[in-house]
Amino acid sequence: MTASKGLAVTSAPAVLRVDDPRRRELEGEGWTVSARSWGARLAADRVDRQLLAALAGRGAALGTVRELHDDDAAAILELDAATASDYPGGIATSHTPLSVAQVVLTGRRRAFGVLGLGEKLLAMTFVDLDGALAEIDFTVVAAPWRGRGLATAVKAASVLALLVDGVRVVRTGGDADNEAIIRANAALGFVVDEQWVTLTAPMRGG
Ligand SMILES: CC(C)(COP(=O)(O)OP(=O)(O)OC[C@H]1O[C@@H](n2cnc3c(N)ncnc32)[C@H](O)[C@@H]1OP(=O)(O)O)[C@@H](O)C(=O)NCCC(=O)NCCS
C-alpha cells in the first residue's frame, strides 16, 4: 500500500486460523492480535436429546419457546435494534443490524425465540441452512433477561427442531471473550474445532 506523506496508513484487519503460516509473517511486520474467535460443531449423533429438552424447558418456564415466523418481524427487529451494540469482539464476530429483508424467514433461514408476556421477544437465535448443515448466525437475549438460561434454552430448542427436520451437523461460533455463549454452547455439547485470530495492522505515519 502506498500513501501520501503525512497520512496514517492502515490495512483492514485480517482474520486467520491460529495456525495459518501467514500469521507469523504479519506478526513479523508488526501486526497484533486484536481479537480471538472460535468455531464449534455439534453432530446429530452426539446430541443428548434429553439434556437439550431439559435445557429448552428452562426457557419454557419463562415464556413460550417456539419457531419464529414472518408475523414476528416487528418483535425481531425491536430486539435486534435494542441489542445491536452488545456483541463483543472484532470483525470476525460482529453483528450487522438486521434489515427488514433479512427478517424474511425461509426454509434456508430459520429463527427460534422465547416470547414473554404480550408476545414480547426475550431471546432469539437465527440459523442458516444448507441441506443437512445448519450454521447458527447469531443468538441474542434482551439485556434484562440475561443470565437465566434463555440463550441456552433457545439454542437447545432450535437444535432439537433442526434434528427433527433432518439436520446432521450444527455449527456455531463466537468471540473468545464471550464467556456466556461459550458456556451455553458447552452445555449443549458443541465441541470447539476451529480457532481464529484477528490481526490488526500497525499504524504507520507518513
Ligand atoms: C451471550 C448471550 C446470548 C447469553 O445469553 P444468556 O441468556 O445470558 O445466557 P445463559 O443464561 O443461557 O447462560 C449461559 C451460560 O453462561 C453463563 N453466563 C451468563 N452470563 C454470563 C456472563 N456475563 N459472564 C460469564 N458467564 C455468563 C451462565 O452462568 C451459563 O453458564 P452455565 O451453563 O455454566 O451455568 C447474551 O449475553 C447476549 O445476548 N449477549 C449479546 C449478544 C451476543 O454476544 N451473542 C452471542 C454471539 S452471537
Image (tube, rainbow, N blue to C red):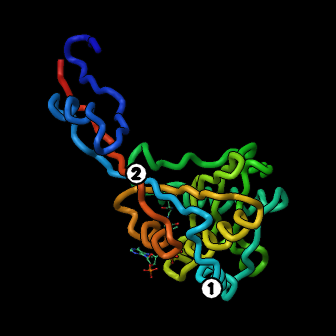
Residue 54 placement, left or right of 117: left
Q: Residue at horizontal 66%, vertical 50%?
A: 128
Can you tell which quarter of the image residue 150 is in? bottom right
Q: Earlier in the sequence, mark 1 or mark 2?
A: 1
Q: Is residue 181 above or below residue 62?
A: above
Badge 2 density bin: few <14, some 14–19, many ≥20, Cα 10 Å:
few
Q: Residue at horizontal 45%, vertical 71%?
A: 186
- The circle on residue 96 is none
Can you tell which quarter of the image residue 180 is in? bottom left
Query: Which residue type carries mark 1?
Result: Ala
CA gap between label 1 and label 2 equals 28 Å
| Residue 48 location (% of width, % of height) | 59, 77
Q: Name the residue tied to disc 1.
A: 54
For the C terminus, which image quadrant? Answer: top left
| Residue 143 location (% of width, % of height) | 53, 71
Q: Residue at horizontal 72%, vertical 79%?
A: 116
Q: Name the residue tied to disc 2.
A: 194
Can you tell which quarter of the image residue 50 is in? bottom right
Quick check: can you spot residue 4?
yes
